Image (tube, rainbow, N blue to C red):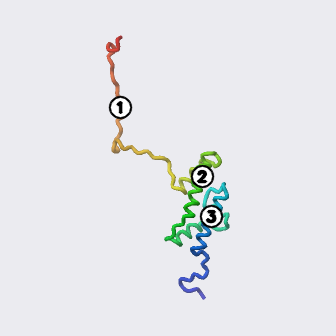
Amino acid sequence: MSAHKGNKYNEIWDLESTKQFFKDVVEYIETEKKCRSISEAVVELGQYEELVSYLINKFPKEDFKSIKRAKDIVKNRLVKQGLDGDANSTMAIFILKNNHNMTDRQQTDITTNGKDVNTSPIIKFVDSEEDGD
């Protein structure tokens, strides 16, 4: 016999257990200084990688500050370790761009309104007699 619609008897993740799990993730990241991703912390805590997304989507009205903190810690750690040479800088850049919405600096030309810049050199001819020759 199947369960009735809306059955939540087997549901293990309520709001309180979710908040506690997210606190555990932050604690793991703070303790393990080589941890460079939330996914790594989640897996090391014995859960599956997609659990964080599942829980955030399950409680859409919640503002999980602990996960935001975990993301900030990991982002800052990647920047620092990438600059110090403690992490592969190419991988650090890749992760920062893909997981933390960081980008290379972009320059925008605001002086020409999209028109080509006149790159013709300005040549000034000077009469050699004026120079005292």
CB-based contact (under 8 Å), mark 2 and mark 3: no
Q: Is residue 82 left or right of residue 121?
A: right
What is the distance, in whole Å, between disc 1 and disc 3 at their CAs? 59 Å
User: Where's residue 85, x and y in %?
Assistant: 64, 45
Helix, strand, or loop for circle 1? loop
User: Where's residue 49, x and y in %?
Assistant: 61, 65
Q: Residue at x 64, y 62 (%)?
A: 27
Helix, strand, or loop for circle 3? helix
What is the distance, in whole Å, between disc 2 and disc 3 at their CAs? 17 Å
Q: Residue at x 60, y 61 (%)?
A: 38
Comparing marks 1 and 3, which lies closer to the viewer?
3
Quadrant of the snapshot with the N terminus: bottom right
Q: Residue at x 60, y 53 (%)?
A: 77
User: Mark on residue 79?
Assistant: none
Quadrant of the snapshot with the C terminus: top left
Q: Amino acid at mark 3?
A: Val
Comparing marks 1 and 2, which lies closer to the viewer?
2
In the picture of the structure, the residue carrying the numbered disc 1 is 120
In the picture of the structure, the residue carrying the numbered disc 3 is 25
User: Where's residue 60, x and y in %?
Assistant: 50, 70
Task: Please name whichever residue, 4 or 102, is drawn nearer the observer in this view of the structure.
Answer: 102
What is the distance, in whole Å, between disc 1 and disc 2 at their CAs? 45 Å
Q: Amino acid at mark 2?
A: Leu
Helix, strand, or loop for circle 2? helix
User: Where's residue 43, x and y in %?
Assistant: 65, 64
CB-based contact (under 8 Å), mark 1 and mark 3: no
Q: Amino acid at mark 1?
A: Ser
Q: Quadrant of residue 39?
A: bottom right
Q: Is residue 70 above or below residue 105?
A: below
Q: Is residue 87 left or right of residue 58?
A: right
In the picture of the structure, the residue carrying the numbered disc 2 is 78
Task: Spot the residue most to the bottom.
Answer: 1
